Image (spheres, rainbow, N blue to C red):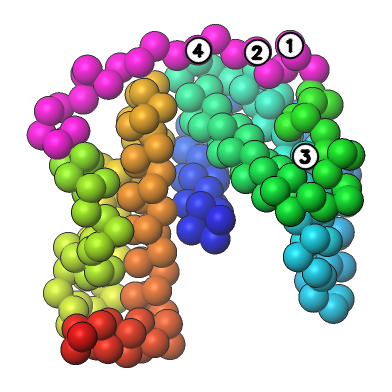
């Protein structure tokens, strides 16, 4: 979930830049600011208090994932130009996936609140959720890029962070940043619109680890810790 949320956050940052650079693609979108503030306040109170139990943490996560703050982009989906809806639908898809993970975990553990778990996004009017399914344009992707994505997906779990980003283990922060931006041009899930769910899942998995690699190597402390683990593995 941590890797998934990191990739999720990067999608949001990418979308924010996209909106800023293409304001004309959006109309006037109504956002429930008070609902968002309420959820943020709730999160801050949880973080500032004693660590919750696993059961309470899952319940809180489900409350947040099913909150109005997590669905405010639906208005943007309805009101934005067709060229942008794919980006926002990807965000909704990730939110639904996150809810599913928490719901399955709660039911598996037979938590007492499991019967109170609402159907994911059930509070959202059907008219807001029913978006036309985009056509799969996987066939329009260059074969060499498809091969590269598939090859990375096969090997990404066994690749170390330097291999994943394509840099030497002595690379500086500028080189790492440049390499990550180059990888994002190919592997960012929102770079390829309307592709098959299978390919989208591969991109999310690979780019999620690339994001983790980037954030680790750009932090002196975390990079030093990673180097110790990497050196230890190479000795065995």
Contact? badges 3 and 1 (CB < 8 Å):
no
The verdict on residue 158 being magenta is no
For label 1, the crowd category at 10 Å Cα-Cα, with few meaning under 14, some 14 to 19 and many 20 or more, is few
Query: Residue at point 77% right, 34% down?
Result: 31
Q: Position of residue 231 (x, y in %)?
A: 24, 88
Q: Counting residues from the N terminus, which is met first, the one under dot 1 or under dot 4?
A: 1
For label 2, the crowd category at 10 Å Cα-Cα, with few meaning under 14, some 14 to 19 and many 20 or more, is few
Query: Residue at point 40% right, 37% down?
Result: 201
Name the residue carrying label 4: 133
Query: Residue at point 48% right, 24% down?
Result: 86
Contact? badges 2 and 3 (CB < 8 Å):
no
Seen in the picture, residue 218 relative to 134 is either above or below; the reply is below
Q: CA distance from mark 3 to mark 1?
A: 17 Å
Magenta-drawn segment: 125-147
Left or right: where 146 falls relative to 202:
left
Q: CA distance from mark 2 to mark 3?
A: 17 Å
Quadrant assignment, res 178: bottom left
What secondary structure is found at the residue carrying circle 3?
A: loop
Quadrant assignment, res 35: top right
Name the residue carrying label 1: 127
Query: Residue at point 88% right, 48% down?
Result: 113
């Amino acid at each position: 979930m941590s890797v998934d949320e990191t990739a999720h956050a990067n999608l949001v940052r990418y979308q924010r830049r996209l909106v800023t650079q293409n304001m004309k693609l959006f109309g006037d979108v109504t956002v429930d600011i008070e609902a968002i503030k309420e959820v943020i306040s709730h999160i801050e109170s949880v973080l500032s208090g004693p660590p919750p139990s696993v059961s309470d943490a899952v319940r809180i996560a489900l409350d947040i994932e099913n909150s109005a703050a997590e669905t405010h982009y639906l208005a943007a989906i309805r009101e934005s130009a067709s060229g942008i809806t794919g980006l926002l639908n990807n965000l909704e898809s990730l939110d639904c996936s996150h809810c599913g993970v928490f719901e399955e975990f709660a039911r598996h553990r037979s938590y007492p609140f499991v019967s109170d778990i609402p159907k994911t996004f059930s509070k959202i009017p059907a008219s807001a959720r029913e978006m036309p399914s985009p056509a799969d344009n996987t066939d329009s992707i260059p074969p060499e890029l498809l091969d590269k994505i598939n090859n990375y997906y096969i090997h990404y779990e066994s690749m170390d962070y330097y291999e994943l980003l394509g840099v030497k283990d002595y690379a500086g922060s500028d080189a790492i940043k440049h390499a990550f931006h180059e990888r994002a041009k190919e592997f960012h899930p929102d770079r390829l619109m309307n592709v098959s769910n299978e390919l989208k899942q591969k991109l999310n998995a690979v780019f999620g680890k690339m994001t983790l690699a980037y954030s680790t190597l750009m932090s002196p402390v975390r990079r030093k810790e990673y180097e110790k683990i990497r050196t230890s593995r190479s000795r065995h």
